[in-house]
Amino acid sequence: MYESIRGVLTRRSPAEVVVESGGVGYRVRIPPTSLEALGLEGGEVRLWLHLHVREDAHLLYGFLTRRERDVFEALLRVSGVGPVSALAVLSGMSVEDLAARVRAGDEEALSRPRGIGRKTAKLIIAQLSDRLDRLLAATGGGVQTATGAGAASRREEDAVLALQALGYKEGVARRSVRSALASAGAGADLQALVKAALAADA
C-alpha cells in the first residue's frame, strides 16, 4: 500500500520520526541506528515504507534504503520474528553482515538481538540463506552520516537513545556506549557504535 515517503522531518527520536508530506504528518518507526543519517529536524528525508497492520493499529516502519526495507520484510516472514525483533536485528548489524551471518550459519550472532532466540536464529538461517543473497543484488544505496562540530557527541547521545529504544535502562546504555567507544573508536559511525555496545553487553 505504501512504498516510500519524501517530506520534512518534523520530529526525531530513536524509536520513531514524524515526516510531514502534503500537509500530513506521518509517524514512522525506524531502526534506532538510522537516526544519525536522517539528520536534524527541518531537513528533507526519504524513507522506504512497510505498513504493518494489527487489530488495534496500522503502523508504518521506515528505512533508509529499499534493500533494508526488503530485508525487514523477509525477516517478518520467519516464524517467531515480529517487527520489534526485526528492527533489533537490523539495529545490531547491516544487511551485508546479516547475510554473511546467515550464510555462515552463525546462530550465536543471530540470536544476540533481543527477541531472537536460538530456535528463531535457526529458522532465519534455514529460510533466508538463499533469499538474502538475492535481496542484496537489489537496488541499494549508501547513506551519509553526520559530520562537523558536535557530530561526535551527538552520535554518542544517539547511541545511548538507540539502546534505550531497544529496551536498555539509561545507566546500562551509557556504560555500554562508553565501553563501545573504547573498542570501536571515537570515529565510529552510529551503527558501528551501537553494534559494539550490543556486543559489549552480550
Image: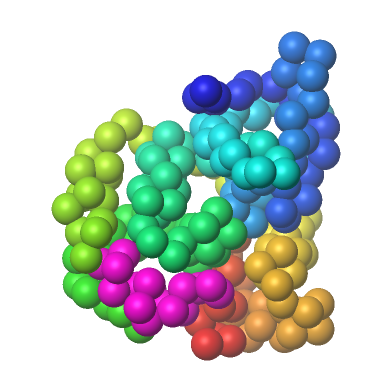
Q: Residue at x 42, y 45 (%)?
A: 73
**Magenta residues (range):** 109-125
| Residue lying furthest front | 55
Q: Residue at x 55, y 54 (%)?
A: 83
Q: Is residue 122 magenta?
A: yes
Q: Residue at x 72, y 55 (%)?
A: 14
Q: Is residue 62 magenta?
A: no
Q: Compared with residue 195, is residue 178 higher up or lower down, i.e. above or below?
A: below
Residue closer to the observer: 23 or 142: 23
The chosen color scheme is: rainbow
Expressed as whole percent of the image width and height from the top left, the position of residue 20 reads 77, 23
Expressed as whole percent of the image width and height from the top left, the position of residue 148 reads 70, 48
Residue 92 showing in the rendered view: yes
Q: Is residue 161 left or right of residue 110?
A: right
Expressed as whole percent of the image width and height from the top left, the position of residue 42 reads 81, 29
Q: Quadrant of residue 162?
A: bottom right
Q: Is residue 22 left or right of residue 37?
A: right
Residue closer to the observer: 185 or 21: 21
Expressed as whole percent of the image width and height from the top left, the position of residue 164 reads 74, 69
Q: Compared with residue 35, is residue 199 higher up or lower down, i.e. above or below?
A: below
Q: Residue at x 47, y 73 (%)?
A: 116
Residue 62 showing in the rendered view: no
Q: Is residue 28 left or right of residue 171?
A: left
Q: Is residue 128 left or right of residue 157?
A: left
Total marks in image: 0
| Residue lying furthest top | 22
